[in-house]
Amino acid sequence: MKNWIALAATRLMCSIGGAFVLAATASPADLAIALSADVTSLDPQYVAIQPNVTIGWHVFDALTRVDERARIIPGIATSWRAVDPTTWEFKLRKGVKFHDGSELTAEDVAFSLARPLAIAGSPGGFAVYVRRIVSKQIVDPYTIRLKTATPYGALPQDLNSIMIVSKKAALNATPADFDSGRAMIGSGPYKFVRWARGDRVELARFDGYREEKPAWDKVTFRMIPSDPARTAALLAGDVDVIENVPTSDLARLRGDPKLRLAEVVSWRTIFFQLDQYRAQPPLVTDLEGKPLAKNPFMDVRVRRAISKAINRKALVERAMENVAVPAANVVSPQIFGHNPGLKPEAYDPEGARKLLAEAGYPNGFAITVSAPNNRYVNDDQVAQAVAQMLTRIGIRCQVEALPFNVYLTKARDQQFSFAMLGWGSYAGDLALRALLVTANSGKGNGAWNWGRYSNPKLDQLVEQALDTVDEKKREALAREAGAVVAADVAIIPLYHQIVMWVMKKNIVFDARTDERSLAQYFRPK
């Protein structure tokens, strides 16, 4: 078995050999990064998907940030403390400037924390991070107190996800106003220049940034979801860095002396969600294509059979070419709340067939395995491999792999019953709140609970974990909640991704657990 700690540590590898000659960039002060998925919105509080968030972290900042290992560190706030069980106080940095020259104060913070709840038509993802706040008190321009109805220990982590916008620029602004650039006034290290939808986002260095200025005058993010096209762009010198390195190109790229590779076990877990709320879910039939009398995914024996049918070791070694580690948890080993006592489900096809028979499906049934084809590393290949494994135990599968923007819309419209999702989080209880706690729009719970799984015991444990400011007690509760999820096979975890970047040899980067391709942390060597 691989050493978890060694896998989690950053590895920067300078390879030898290879024969590709890279063209020089137009300017040593410019950086071009190829993203592996498209940006859908520039509004930093509209929809929480990775490409959007990556761009946001260049233009905006938040009260708290995370370092390369996903640990919470100061951002706009220099410090925070629990004044009492239901009150958090945040001290802000003085002299933080927005890109228009105005100063960031507690007024902008209060406005930014209220805005996610007021955005019309938001697909979701950000309201959950502020819903616990029942009142805001501006003590002075650099101090704000946030009141929660009950004790809530995860607030500093939640607020890492809420980027602070300029009240003056964003008042009454719609997501379209951010997309056009009119409202794209932040306090981050880069200013917005241009967005060519589906092609690129261009940023320019903000010389008034409060910290050390980043090395690059201009940063261009190219949207290149095609794996071969990203590799070709790097080798041709059209970009300086690519993310989500295609595994099929790894040997070639590692052997090129003009390139450098950085990798780390990421916080992202890849898993399948199963419809557990409709009597006759879509895309699930008997072997003749007729609707089943009941939803098989509501039976824990069927869910366990599916889990046993998946050979995670083979999946990692073949479909993922060893750029992943088998998973039993919703969060990866280095993340708060990971339960080390849980082990990946053992591959047991015979046991899986017996469970299907016990559940009343001795001859199996038919499903569609739904997945994106350009969002996660080898996502469509993984879907195909899982489909083949399930077919061997009698669950006949066909695969529907779609571009992520199409896939996400269909998933949110509840058009899938067996759907792939990848999730990264700062903490196990926060991941469970989003993914598996009973969906409740009023509380902001279950925003990504596509299968509508519901378990009162899990809900209670997650609520208890989030309600405590005692870190040890909170983590113990989060681990217990993870054990409940595993015992009930609430989802089908596959693996934790190893995230990789390849860049030109004259650039260095500390690989980030959060998978974000942040230009300010790439440095010329």
Image (cartoon, rainbow, N blue to C red):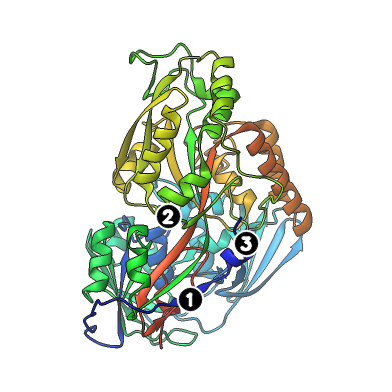
Q: Earlier in the sequence, mark 2 or mark 1?
A: 1
From mark 3 to mark 2, how far is it between C-alphas?
17 Å
Choose between 163 and 522: the one closer to the eye: 522
The amino acid marked with disc number 1 is Leu
Which of 370 and 53 lies nearest the eye of the viewer? 370
Residue situated furthest top in the rendering: 293
Determine the secondary structure under disc 2. Answer: loop
At label 2, the amino acid type is Glu
Q: Which callout, 3 or 2, points at the residue further toward the start of the chain? A: 3
| Element type at mark 1 | strand
Q: Are marks 2 and 1 in contact (CB under 8 Å)?
A: no
Say the numbered circle drawn on residue 3.
3
Where, quadrant-wise, is the N terminus in this rendering?
A: bottom right
Picture residue at 40% right of the left edge, 32% below the top: 414
For label 3, the crowd category at 10 Å Cα-Cα, with few meaning under 14, some 14 to 19 and many 20 or more, is few
Measure how far apart labels 1 and 3 are at the Cα level: 17 Å
Q: Give coordinates of residue 412: x percent, y percent.
A: 39, 38
Contact check, label 3 and label 2, Cβ < 8 Å: no
Report the disc number at residue 12: 1
Residue drawn at the location 24% of the way across and 76% of the way down: 20
Q: Is residue 150 visible?
A: no
Question: On screen, 387 above or below 509?
Answer: above
Q: Which residue is identified by label 2?
A: 321
Res 42 quadrant in image: bottom left
Image quadrant assignment for residue 383: top left
| Identity of the residue drawn at 22% across and 63% down | 199
Answer left or right for 178 relative to 317: left
**Left or right of 341 on screen, residue 313:** left
On the rendered structure, is 364 left or right of 132? Answer: left
Q: Residue furthest front?
A: 17
In the picture, which quadrant includes the C terminus?
bottom left
Gap in Å between the C-alphas at discs 2 and 1?
A: 19 Å
